[in-house]
Amino acid sequence: MATDYSAYQSIYTYMSSVLGQLRSLGTSEQSVGSLGSGKTTAAGQSFGDTFRSAAGRLGVPESMDAIFEEAAEKYNVPVNLLMAVGKAESGFNADAVSSAGAQGVMQLMPATAAALGVDNAFDARSNIMGGAKYLSQKLQQYNGDIDLTLAAYNAGSGNVEKYGGVPPFNETINYIRRIREYMGQELSTGKTVTAASSANPSAGQSRKSAGTQQTAAASDLTQQLAEYFVGMMRLQMMNRVSSLGKGSSLGSTDSDYTSLW
């Protein structure tokens, strides 16, 4: 007996129609990527990354502690080391600027930030990720030696090479000692940040402009969610069709579509 897949096709057609209506609003330039692969953007971002990006544009608060933990895991840097550097450098201040021009939580110099791919050094997430990436590079360069890594972070790799180790600078020696002390403590920033609050103050916008951007971002997020669920529905239907083709049959629970999920 042939199996009737019309119910699945109807649901998929309906969700595709909803997505089409959202697209017609013209609030986003994004295109649907490979729905079957769970991607939502042409650039291949995962849904989680896209959701986090949209949440940032909407000003949703994010735990700075969580950002440190994520960065530490991503770049394989001890989280206590990463947080200790953040505390020593800026006291976890996303808007900090040193007399030398270093910026943000991890006090990245503009040229260093650019080389690390940090577009906005006053964005806490980007800055911490950049600092973690730099520490990871130095740990690899110095075979895991934390003192040399910290010396390079403070005084530059050139001075580490010049002196064949930790430079004999009181500032650098005290810097390493202070961070070592912080590493032995239970550190917590106790802060939440948003992309808007940690932006460079000189790049501020009017309330009207910000409101317009948030509205567009909200619409953009709605479309992304729709794309995600349409893609998930497609995958579920493909799996169901595959299983049905192997001999199973539509059960009574399929009538209300709960078994799709």
Image: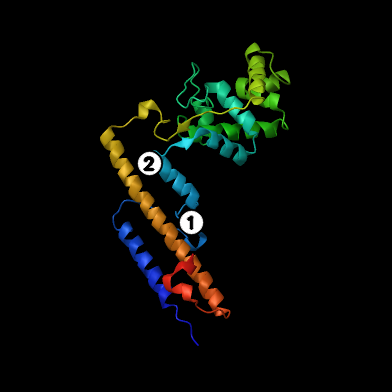
Residue found 31% across the figure and 37% down from its top: 210
Q: Say which residue appears at 40% left-offset and 53% top-offset.
A: 224
The residue indicated by pointer 1 is 39
- Percent position (x, y) of residue 150? 65, 24
In the image shown, does 94 or 133 lie closer to the viewer?
A: 94
Is 250 situated above or below 203? below
Mark 1 surroundings: few (<14), some (14-19) or many (≥20) residues within 10 A: many
Question: Residue furthest toward the front?
Answer: 252
What secondary structure is found at the residue carrying circle 2? loop
Three-letter amino acid code of the residue under disc 2: Leu
Hey, which quadrant is residue 9 in on the image? bottom left
The location of residue 70, given as percent across then percent down, is: 57, 39
Mark 1 residue type: Lys
**Which numbered tag is attached to residue 146?**
none
What label sits on residue 58 in the rendered view?
Answer: 2
85 or 167, which is in the foreground?
85
